């Protein structure tokens, strides 16, 4: 048995509709799936993101284990072709720096992360391996 690849990343928000709007602005696409909770309030929104249409789901924080009030835990990094420009845009949209742009060794891997306005850590990176397996970097 082996891990076959990233499938779905779930993040939490007190206001799923506001988080959905923020991510739609950042991603440049609308969520394709919605689910309301028993109270009729939007409880889940999901986007398809990236080259492999990975799922990014936003879940009402009411269902977060332990309340999920602090950013932390594992950081999942999304490959981006323009790391500095992406971090700049995220901060302009209201995210706060979590980890600055940091080279990881001397092979071209560079990471950064922000905390979105809803308390989730969002990792972004330039990953030469990702570029290699997907063919080539997309034009900026």
Image: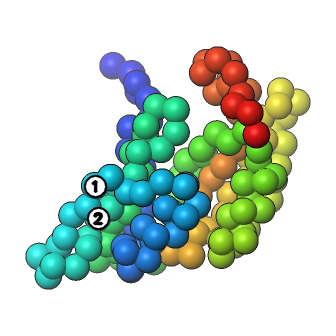
Q: Is residue 71 visible?
A: no
Could you tell me residue 94's position as x and y percent? 65, 75
Query: Which residue shows up at 38% across the image and 63% down it?
Result: 58
Query: Which residue shows up at 57% across the image and 76% down it?
Result: 117
Quarter of the image where the N terminus is located = top left
Residue 132 sits in quarter: top right
Q: In this view, does 78 lie above or below 43?
A: above
Quarter of the image where the C terminus is located = top right
Identify the element where label 2 is drawn.
strand
Could you tell me residue 127's position as x and y percent? 71, 33
Identify the element where label 1 is drawn.
strand
Could you tell me residue 129's position as x and y percent? 68, 24
Disc 1 designates what residue?
33
Contact between marks 2 and 1 (CB within 8 A): the answer is yes
Query: Which residue shows up at 60% across the image and 21% down it?
Result: 134
Left or right? Give the position of 77 relative to 19.
right
Mark carried by residue 44: 2
Classify mark 1: residues with Cα within 10 Å, few (<14), some (14-19) or many (20+): few
Residue 136 sits in quarter: top right
Residue 31 sits in quarter: bottom left
Distance between the alpha carbons at the discs numbered 2 and 1:
8 Å
């Amino acid at each position: 048995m082996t891990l076959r690849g990233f499938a779905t990343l779930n993040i939490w928000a007190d206001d799923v509709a506001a988080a959905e709007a923020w991510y739609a602005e950042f991603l440049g696409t609308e969520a394709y799936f919605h689910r309301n909770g028993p109270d009729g309030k939007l409880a889940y929104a999901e986007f398809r993101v990236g080259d492999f249409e990975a799922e990014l789901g936003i879940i009402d924080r009411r269902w977060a284990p332990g309340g999920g009030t602090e950013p932390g835990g594992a950081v999942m990094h999304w490959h981006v072709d323009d790391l500095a420009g992406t971090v700049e845009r995220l901060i302009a949209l209201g995210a706060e720096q979590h980890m600055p742009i940091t080279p990881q060794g001397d092979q071209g891997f560079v990471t950064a992360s922000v905390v979105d306005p809803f308390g989730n850590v969002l990792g972004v990176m330039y990953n030469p391996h990702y570029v290699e397996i997907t063919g080539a970097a997309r034009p900026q």
